[in-house]
């Protein structure tokens, strides 16, 4: 065996390649065939990566991506927030305290409305949808974000199906914020523009219908949005976000996402157009009624109730607009991630506080409750 090896090496040098021994000459035909097959498979994967990856990759980076090429992996990795070692615990406690405030404030206002018969009015019953939405939306997202802050990046893992559920809840939260405030605007319109028919229009059945429509429309729209995404095959595993959303999920695919982009854009345009359009139209009519009316009590009522509703809407709209705008600037990805979390935290914290402070009925109930405890 050793003499054969020496003869082959000499033959290689005699063939005009002195001082160099080629390993390919030592390969048996079966070994060479296997090597060629492996190279062909690598070229195929590399070609697939280059064909479907939108970003321009350095060849070395493309090769690493090719080596880690995994189809439809059940485990995904979250990129998370980029937090320095010094600020880990301050950031964690900020989100932890925010979550406690969200849960206590929203549960508190739900309990107040439930136990006080004076608050069993259409306006407050429709408002109950917002605290429920804030509690569910933040409970699905914030605990995971907080736990990932304390973990090293390599351990920020989530299963694919859990990621889909989280994305569905996140988009339901954002969509129902709009639809709930739209049905609340309808209630204010009827109360101010048609006060004599308010009781006949805003019956218990109407409140139920408005509530079901607000959640049902959001469920259908978001269901289609995620349905178009889960049909795609995945060739990546990194979620470029602190939590899962639709855009992060379909970016895992190496297939065409043209339909997803078209539906996502249409969804966003229709939702914002309907939301902003209905609010502007409602408040335009309310303004006309208030300007033409000489009743001071009507104007005072409109100012109090509508200013609260409009304040909630502007907080939600501005928070959402910031996230959407930052999506267009990849260089501000860290700010986008933070704003995406604050989109849940800020409205969820402020909604019950603003409504509680502005509502005379809630203030009266709280003062009676505090006074009765002092007396006892």
Image (cartoon, rainbow, N blue to C red):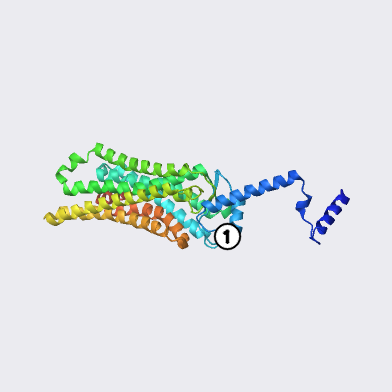
- Residue farthest along the top direction in this orientation: 205
Left or right: where does residue 44 sit relative to residue 287? right
Q: Identify which residue, 212 or 117, lies in the foreground.
A: 212
Q: Nearer the viewer, residue 301 or 236?
A: 236
Is 38 in front, or is 17? 17
Please state if 302 lies on the left or on the right of 80 as rendered: left
Q: Residue at x 49, y 60 (%)?
A: 90
Q: Position of residue 194 (x, y in %)?
A: 16, 46
The outermost residue toward the left is 294
Neighbor class of circle 1 (other Cα within 10 Å; few <14, some 14-19, many 20+) is few
Q: Is residue 54 left or right of residue 365?
A: right
Q: How many marks?
A: 1
Q: Position of residue 16 (x, y in %)?
A: 79, 60
Residue drawn at x 77%, y 55% is 22
Is residue 322 visible in the rendered image? The answer is: yes
Q: Is residue 107 visible?
A: no
**Quick one: which residue is furthest to the right in this view?**
3
Name the element at disc 1: loop
Residue at numbered disc 1: 58
Q: Position of residue 35 (x, y in %)?
A: 70, 48
Q: Residue at x 40, y 57 (%)?
A: 323
Task: Give me the residue at 48% from left, 50% from top.
Answer: 251
**Residue 279: x %, y % from top left:** 26, 52
């Amino acid at each position: 065996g050793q003499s054969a090896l020496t003869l082959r090496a000499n033959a290689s040098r005699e063939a005009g390649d002195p001082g160099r021994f080629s390993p390919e000459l030592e390969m048996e035909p079966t070994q060479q065939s296997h090597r060629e097959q492996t190279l062909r498979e690598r070229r195929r994967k590399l070609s697939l990566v280059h064909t479907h990856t939108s970003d321009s990759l350095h060849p070395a980076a493309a090769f690493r991506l090719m080596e880690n090429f995994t189809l439809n992996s059940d485990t995904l990795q979250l990129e998370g927030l980029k937090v320095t070692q010094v600020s880990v615990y301050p950031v964690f406690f900020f989100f932890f305290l925010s979550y406690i405030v969200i849960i206590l404030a929203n549960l508190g206002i739900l309990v107040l409305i439930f136990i006080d018969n004076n608050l069993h009015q259409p306006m407050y019953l429709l408002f109950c949808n917002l605290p429920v939405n804030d509690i569910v939306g933040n409970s699905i997202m914030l605990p995971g974000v907080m736990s990932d802050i304390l973990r090293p990046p390599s351990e920020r893992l989530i299963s694919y199906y859990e990621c889909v559920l989280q994305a569905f809840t996140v988009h339901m939260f954002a969509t129902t914020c709009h639809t709930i405030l739209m049905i609340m605007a309808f209630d204010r319109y009827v109360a101010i523009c048609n006060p004599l028919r308010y009781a006949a229009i805003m019956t218990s059945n109407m409140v139920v219908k408005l509530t079901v429509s607000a959640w049902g429309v959001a469920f259908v729209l978001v269901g289609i949005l995620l349905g178009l995404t889960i049909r795609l095959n995945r060739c990546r595993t990194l979620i470029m976000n602190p939590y899962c959303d639709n855009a992060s999920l379909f970016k895992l695919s190496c297939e065409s996402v043209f339909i997803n982009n078209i539906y996502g854009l249409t969804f966003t345009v229709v939702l914002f157009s309907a939301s902003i359009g209905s609010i502007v139209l409602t408040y335009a009519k309310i303004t006309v009624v208030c300007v033409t009316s000489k009743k001071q009590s009507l104007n005072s009522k409109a100012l109090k109730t509508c200013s609260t509703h409009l304040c909630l809407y502007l907080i939600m709209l501005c928070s959402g607009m910031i996230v959407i705008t930052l999506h267009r600037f990849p260089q501000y990805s860290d700010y986008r991630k933070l704003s995406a979390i604050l989109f849940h935290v800020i409205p969820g914290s402020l909604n019950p506080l603003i409504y509680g402070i502005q509502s005379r009925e809630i203030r009266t109930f709280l003062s009676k409750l505090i006074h009765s405890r002092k007396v006892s």
